[in-house]
Image (tube, helix red, strand yellow):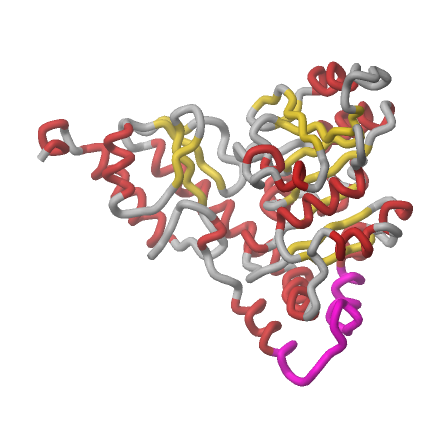
Amino acid sequence: MRSFGSDNNSGASSEVLAALAAANVDHAIGYGDDPWTARTRELFAEEFGPGAEAFLVLNGTGANVLALSLAAGPATCVLCGEGAHIDVDETGAPEAAGIKVLPLESRRGKVLPEALREALGAIGTVHSAQPSCLSISQPTELGAVYAKAEIEELARIAHEAGILVHMDGARIANAAVALGLPFRAFTVDAGVDLLSFGGTKNGILFGEALLVFRPELAKRAPYLRKARLQLASKMRFIAAQYEAYLRGGLWRRNAEAANAAAARLAGLARGIPGVELVGEVETNALFARLDPAAAERLRAEYFFYDWEGGLVRWMTSFDTTEADIQGFAAALARALARGPAEARA
């Protein structure tokens, strides 16, 4: 099976698997008191600055809920973009943790500054949940990448109002490659306070990280991580993967490959009659509009998701090959070339 449904469907990088095998030799102290976790925390500090504290967790939803738990409390709310993962794809996990989530008007998933300002007007109103954090996805769930200046503007508005900024970076490596910037430039240096750092969509087998850039929040994080069910007993197996991922630029090579594959597929798809690509292809996500019957015929050969607004989503991965791209494009052309009579047959 070769899938264009999600980068979650790909396997793990050979370097990551080798690191796991090496970490499996002998015993090590649990709950993060091991050499792999110490080295990985140092690598994160090299990427994000000496004040960055990294907390390894089990999954992306766990990273998000832990981050928002640090940023929100009773009678508060978290603001986010329309279609944000924390709002529509986490089965109410933030709400289950007592965190109210309010989506704001967005463009391709990017929060509009004027919508943020309007929402902040609730501050001081006793009948409204008080905004305590803005959460943005980088890239967004619609594949758009915030420019550094856009993040800086939203962070300035948020901080002037006294609220924190969280970034859901499930595909942060793809965004970094698209921007041509180091992680730090468009996160902590742009005003982000909390970062959910994802790797499982880019060659990691399991586990994510929460980066905390404020010392007062970092002091509480170890206890909340345990309370939010995200403290791994054999943490070295998460840490070993991220050590291999961060050291030597594996994250960058994988993201470059995924983004380049998406650009290549987009180029072929644009040349097929009946395909309408929607929005710029900035990372490894493509959104298209095509005849529903053709989509079903294509789905007989390849798995992919329907998306809201009558779109379909195709995603490439770090291990997507040229043969994969050519095969998918050929199947797409066949699906769209079949006439109504042949389709009924």
Foreground residue among 192 and 61: 61
Q: Quadrant of the N terminus?
A: bottom left
Q: Quadrant of the C terminus?
A: top left
Q: Is residue 276 depicted above or below 252 in this figure?
A: above
Residue 319: image quadrant is bottom left
- Residue at (48% x, 39% y) in the render: 285
Q: As drawn, is 75 to the left or to the right of 303?
A: right
* Residue 337, horizontal then vertical, whole percent: 19, 33
Residue at the limit of the structure toward the right, as seen here: 216
Q: Is residue 125 depicted above or below 42 in this figure?
A: above
Q: As drawn, is 71 to the left or to the right of 2?
A: right
Foreground residue among 14 and 127: 127
Residue at the limit of the structure toward the bottom, as seen here: 26
Badge count: 0
Q: As drawn, is 27 to the left or to the right of 174?
A: right
- Residue at (39% x, 46% y) in the render: 4
Foreground residue among 325 and 80: 80
* Residue 134, horizontal then vertical, whole percent: 74, 30
- Residue at (9% x, 29% y) in the render: 341
- Residue at (42% x, 37% y) in the render: 313
* Residue 344, horizontal then vertical, whole percent: 11, 32
Q: As drawn, is 109 to the left or to the right of 195?
A: left
Residue 45: image quadrant is bottom right
Foreground residue among 9 and 64: 64
* Residue 305, horizontal then vertical, whole percent: 40, 39
Q: Which residues are magenta?
A: 22-43
Q: Is residue 239 depicted above or below 276 in this figure?
A: below
